[in-house]
Each structure stands twice: as C-alpha cells, then as structure tokens.
Amino acid sequence: RVRLTWSAATDGSTNVARYEIQQRIDSGGFDGVGSGSGTATIRTLQTGHSYVFQVRAIDAVGNAGPWRVSPTFHPYLYQSGSNTTTSGTWHASSGSAYSGGSSRYATAKGASMTFTATSARSIAFVTAKGTSRGSFKVYVDGVLRKTISTFATSARYRQLVYQFSWTSPGTHKVKIVVSGTSGHPRVDADAFVVLR
C-alpha cells in the first residue's frame, strides 16, 4: 500500500471541488482510479509492475486544471537472503506460506539482519506472526525507530509490519535486531519490499 499526496490547488476565482486521479500500469494507458476532495489517496501496488499516477483539480463549475504527473514507481520484493548481511545465527525455513517459499529466522537475542537498497523511496519488512514469535528492534540508517512484537494467537504469514519512506530516492539500510523474547523468541525475516 502506497500513500500518494499532492499540494492543494485553486484556480484563483473558484474553489476546488474535487481532484481526479488516474493510474497507468506498465506501458498501458491512464485509467481513472477515483476522485475526492482530499489531497491524498492510498493505492495498492504489485511487485513486478511499474506505476505512474496523475491528478488534476476540478472546480465547482467543472473547469479542470492541468494534469500533474508523478514519477514512475517500481515495487520490488527481495527475499531475506538478497542484499542482506547477518550477525548471529540464522536458520532457514521453507513453506508455501512464505512470500517466496522460504524464510530465515533467528531466536538468539542480538542476532541481526541488515538490508541495503539503492534508489529507495520506501522500504518495508515482511515477517510471520504466531505464538512462538517475539519482538525485534528496527533501525533505519543507524537510528532506532521502533520495537515491534510479532506475537499473535494464531499463525499469520506475509505480514508487512514496518515501513519507512523518504521524500526522494537514495541508498538506505534497515536493520532488525532480535530481542530474544522469553518463551517465544523467534523472529522471521521473510522479505523486504522496496519502492523505487
């Protein structure tokens, strides 16, 4: 899920009544995906495709302003063995419930995994939840951002539990550090999702 925002517009004489939003997938044409009075929308993007959005303001008497076109967005899915470095002991686990058919997990306090992405606008972490799963700390570019619990009363896979975004593309690192939660220490690293 991606949140798109744009600046409010006026035509100088009549207030904006709504914004019209269109989307283009890959090399196709633009299709309408909604309209509303707000200056933000949430869209769900799929990996393996490219997306471009455009928005225009329409005033109370139906006059439409020019289209404002977004950059091209490319969502990518990286399994936990790609673009990562680890510290401590990590084990392999396989199964169709994982996003790529496999995952890596650690149980020891302090075990860490660092993912690096270039030209990234956003990075998200995908994991599993369950009764045996515990907590981990998230560091973004070396700064502690959050401690996240993956404990749940029933098993849940392909869970996007943390996402961090930047205003412009760049090289960034996301590091997860296992907390070693008593009684349920396991933390799964299923995948990282990058929006470029």
Image (cartoon, rainbow, N blue to C red):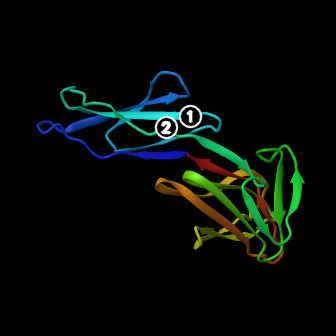
Name the secondary structure under disc 1.
Answer: loop
Residue 192 spot, x, y in % from top left: 68, 53
Q: Quadrant of the N terminus?
A: top right
Q: Toward the viewer: 118 or 74? A: 118
Q: Measure the alpha-carbon separation of dots 1 and 2.
A: 7 Å
Q: Is residue 51 left or right of residue 87?
A: left
Across and down, in percent, residue 2 comes to 52, 46
Q: Secondary structure at mark 2?
A: loop
Q: Percent x, y for residue 56?
A: 31, 33
Left or right, 115 with reference to 5: right
- Is 46 situated above or below 171? above
Mark 2 closeness class: few <14, some 14–19, many ≥20 residues within 10 Å: few
Residue at 73% from the left image edge and 56% from the top image edge: 127
Task: Point out the residue furthest to the top here.
Answer: 29
Q: Measured along the vertical axis of the image, is residue 126 above or below residue 45?
A: below
Q: Residue at x 11, y 37 (%)?
A: 13
Neighbor class of circle 1 (other Cα within 10 Å; few <14, some 14-19, many 20+) is: some
CB contact under 8 Å: marks 1 and 2: yes
Residue 3: which numbered mark, if any? none
Residue 72: give its label. 2
**Residue located at (29% from left, 35% from top):** 18
Left or right: 43 as drawn, with respect to 177: left
Seen in the picture, residue 31 relative to 41 is either above or below; the reply is: above
In the picture, measured across the screen, residue 160 lies left or right of residue 186, that is: left
Q: In the rendering, at what x and y percent does residue 54 appear?
A: 39, 33
Q: Amino acid at mark 1?
A: Ser
What amino acid type is highlighted by mark number 2? Answer: Thr
Residue under circle 1? 50
